[in-house]
Image (tube, rainbow, N blue to C red):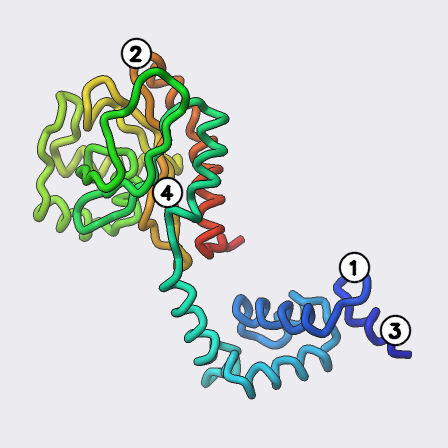
């Protein structure tokens, strides 16, 4: 009889599920779905089992019920989340994905983070090419003239972009740099449409890149990943053709940082 009950509680297509696995299934589902019926559907467990586990989670402070009866993160899980966020080492999380990407595209990979109105490089990993990019970890670059900066700015509202321009200006770094608000807005609209940004020798002459957004656990674009190379080696078309590689790596890093895309 016990085995029959366990099998009834097992999600479809699986064998018996341990008590700890059931608890984790219910907790994860409750964080994504506020309604009890949705939690039941997401876990594939029996209603009685889900109800019992939720009651225990509520008793321990992992979930609470809102005014509409839906489930919300409780003080215990918020406290644990805060502790986990304090211990996140972005560079350590990104590096394995960066190393894998370098092996595939044979170019320099950067990961940068927004710091005020600039982008600061957190990672620069080179391929085995005989040249090195004119960049270094900790170096700050403008947002409007860099691929990583553009993907960060693409997450800004129209008003936030205007305020950014008013504060930082749009200084010309090269003859290719975007220097007007109208052109920047047009560029950012294109970035949002295609999911990546290009630096067409806009920051450093002879250097170009394709960049993709990296999202934190809230979904905000706080970071970016770029594939950089010399225009003497790759044409802009060839660089843009590497966009899917950049997007895939950036998405994997976003997932590692806790971001979950909604269907």
Asked if the residue at tag 3 contacts the one at tag 2, i.e. Cβ–Cβ closer than 8 Å, the answer is: no
* Image point (64%, 68%), residue name: 25
Q: CA distance from mark 2 to mark 4?
A: 26 Å
Q: Secondary structure at mark 2?
A: loop
Image spot of residue 166 (x, y percent): 8, 47
Image spot of residue 138 (x, y percent): 23, 42
| Left or right relative to 64: residue 202 | left
Residue 29's disc is none
Q: CA distance from mark 2 to mark 3?
A: 67 Å
Q: CA distance from mark 1 to mark 4?
A: 36 Å
Q: CA distance from mark 4 to mark 3?
A: 47 Å
Residue tagged 2: 232
| Left or right relative to 145: residue 62 | right
Q: Is residue 226 above or below residue 176?
A: below
Q: Crowdedness of circle 2 by 10 Å Cα count: few (<14), some, many (20+)? A: few
Residue tagged 3: 3
Q: Nearer the viewer, residue 132 or 165?
A: 132
Q: CA distance from mark 2 to mark 1?
A: 54 Å
* Image point (68%, 68%), residue name: 21
Residue tagged 4: 213
Marks 2 and 3, the one that precedes in the sequence: 3
Marks 1 and 4, the one that precedes in the sequence: 1
Q: CA distance from mark 3 to mark 1?
A: 14 Å
Residue tagged 1: 14
In the displayed image of the protein, which residue is found farthest to the bottom? Answer: 59
Image spot of residue 119 (x, y percent): 23, 42
Q: Crowdedness of circle 3 by 10 Å Cα count: few (<14), some, many (20+)? A: few
Marks 3 and 1, the one that precedes in the sequence: 3
Marks 2 and 4, the one that precedes in the sequence: 4
């Amino acid at each position: 009889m016990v085995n029959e009950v366990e099998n009834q509680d097992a999600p479809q297509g699986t064998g018996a599920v341990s008590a700890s696995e059931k608890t984790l299934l219910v907790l994860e589902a409750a964080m994504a779905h506020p309604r009890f019926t949705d939690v039941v559907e997401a876990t594939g467990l029996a209603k009685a089992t889900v109800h019992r586990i939720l009651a225990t989670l509520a008793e321990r402070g992992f979930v609470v019920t809102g005014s509409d009866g839906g489930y919300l993160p409780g003080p215990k899980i918020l406290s644990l989340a805060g502790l986990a966020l304090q211990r996140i080492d972005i560079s350590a999380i990104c590096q394995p994905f960066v190393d894998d990407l370098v092996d595939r595209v044979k170019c320099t990979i950067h990961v940068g983070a927004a710091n005020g109105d600039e982008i600061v490089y957190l990672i620069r990993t080179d391929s085995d090419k005989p040249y090195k990019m004119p960049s270094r970890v900790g170096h700050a670059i403008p947002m409007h003239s860099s691929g990583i900066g553009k993907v960060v700015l693409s997450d800004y509202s129209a008003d936030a972009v205007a305020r950014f321009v008013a504060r930082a200006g749009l200084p010309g770094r090269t003859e290719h740099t975007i220097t007007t608000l109208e052109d920047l807005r047009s560029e950012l609209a294109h970035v949002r449409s295609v999911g990546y940004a290009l630096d067409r020798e806009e920051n450093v002459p002879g250097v170009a890149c394709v960049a993709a957004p990296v999202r934190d656990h809230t979904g905000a674009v706080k970071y970016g990943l770029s594939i950089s190379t010399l225009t003497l080696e790759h044409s802009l078309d060839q660089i843009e053709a590497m966009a899917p590689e950049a997007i895939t790596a950036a998405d994997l890093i976003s997932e590692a940082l806790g971001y979950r895309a909604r269907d």
